[in-house]
Image (cartoon, rainbow, N blue to C red):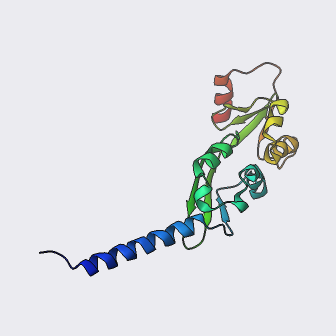
Amino acid sequence: MSENPIKKILITTILIALSYGIFYLLCQKSNLCIEIHGLNLISEEEIKGKLIDFDLTNKALIQINPRLISKRLSQSPLIKSVKAKSSLLPQHKLSIYIEETKPWAIYRDSILGQQAQVLIESKMAAIKYQSDAINRLYAESHQSKSPVLELMSTKALSDAELLMLKNS
């Protein structure tokens, strides 16, 4: 029972054409749509600014490494986790899913997270992140509408004391 050789040639030709079409779509430089999800404190412009080094407008989808993008964005102390995912259809799209860290308070120039852990040591340490969101937290900390508390104490509080204060 040998198959018809014409049928084999036809199937092989279709598979080659399909492979070529997919490869062409992957290598084609086109308008890349960037979607960013999960932002609250950080602005979309700030995230896109951190992606400038990747030159996403001049790359084909196959040249974009979502893991490198996730790694770069996760360097911010205000970002808990990042997942970047590229997709080909229905359009060339890079989707970035961000879970932000929730800052709780500013204590002695340090920004503390929900578990009273130090997210940013000081305003001087914050400079290296070049983040508008971090600058905004420091600038708004003295205002009543601030998203973080400003804690003041005459003595240095331990981590346990800060956590106890947070939970009270």
Residue 102: percent from left, percent from top: 67, 44
Q: Please state which of residues 50 and 41 is positioned toward the viewer in this rendering.
A: 50
Q: Quadrant of the C terminus?
A: top right
Q: Please state which of residues 61 and 95 is positioned toward the viewer in this rendering.
A: 61
Q: Please state which of residues 164 and 56 is positioned toward the viewer in this rendering.
A: 56
Residue 93: percent from left, percent from top: 61, 65
* Residue 4 visible in the shown view: yes
Q: Is residue 111 left or right of residue 70?
A: right
Q: Please state which of residues 68 and 9 is positioned toward the viewer in this rendering.
A: 9
Question: Dividing the picture into quarters, in which one does residue 120 lie?
Answer: top right
Q: Is residue 72 left or right of residue 106?
A: left
Residue 60: percent from left, percent from top: 63, 62
User: Is 123 placed above or below 21 here?
Assistant: above
Q: Residue at x 68, y 39 (%)?
A: 75
Question: Dividing the picture into quarters, in which one does residue 129 lie?
Answer: top right
Q: Is residue 1 left or right of residue 123?
A: left
Q: Residue at x 44, y 74 (%)?
A: 17
Q: Residue furthest left?
A: 1
User: Is 29 placed above or below 152 here?
Assistant: below
Q: Quadrant of the N terminus?
A: bottom left
* Residue 88 visible in the shown view: no
Residue 14: percent from left, percent from top: 39, 76
Q: Residue furthest front?
A: 5
Total marks in image: 0
Question: Dividing the picture into quarters, in which one does residue 153 lie?
Answer: top right
